[in-house]
Image (tube, rainbow, N blue to C red):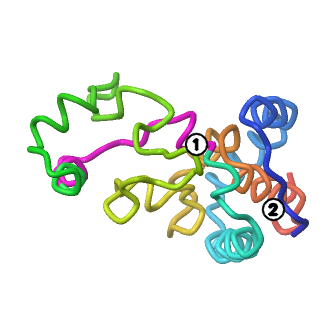
Amino acid sequence: MDQIPYIKPEKLREFTNNRRQDFTLLFKKLKAKKPKNLDDVVHELHNEAFDQFDCLTCANCCSTISPVITEKDAERMAKRLKMKAVDFISQYLRIDEDKDYVFKQTPCPFLMSDNYCMVYEDRPKACREYPHTDRKRMYQILNLTHKNCEVCPVVFCITDELARNSVFKV
């Protein structure tokens, strides 16, 4: 995989829109066929990508989207901040259209100016797992992966590589 540069979210949206047809066809094909080696291929690309890409140079995810916050996440972060969970929820969270807790604001209220996370050790599960390109059964989250192409340079590059890969060629 080529070197992955930092790409601003506006540019990623533009790049993703330019590749929308290819990516949509790729994901439709992958959902229908569920190739047995999809996870292995994506995980290898994930490892290659993160061997060279430093998320601290980016923080697009923390700057532009809010993770789903579980009750356990809220309790853990509240404890970290020496707050009651109910106060943490009141101060930092709202319920979105899917009835999930999310942060009231973006960028994340715990993103510091150097792109480090103030609550890193106790960050939400969704943050720990982002961008989800190392999980099992990738075919189950292809819609999310497509959406994440607009936020994460690594996801865009992995998806671009998949679209070009002769095994999954569209």
Q: Position of residue 141 (x, y in %)?
A: 53, 51
Amino acid bearing label 1: Asn
Kindly report the secondary structure that dominates the magenta region of the rendered protein: helix
Between 31 and 147, the one nearer to me in the picture: 147
The secondary element bearing badge 2 is classed as loop
> Along the polypeptide, which appears first: circle 1 or circle 2?
1
Q: Which residue is mark 2?
A: 168
- Residue under the point 51% across and 65% down: 137
Which range of residues does the magenta coloring cover?
Answer: 60-75
- Residue under the point 33% across and 28% down: 98
In the picture, the quarter occupied by the N terminus is bottom right
Q: Which residue is mark 1?
A: 143
- Residue under the point 57% across and 57% down: 139
Between 107 and 68, the one nearer to me in the picture: 107
> In the rendered view, would you say 81 is above or below 99?
below
Q: Residue furthest top?
A: 97
- Left or right? Give the position of 170 relative to 58: right
Residue 5 counted in the magenta span: no
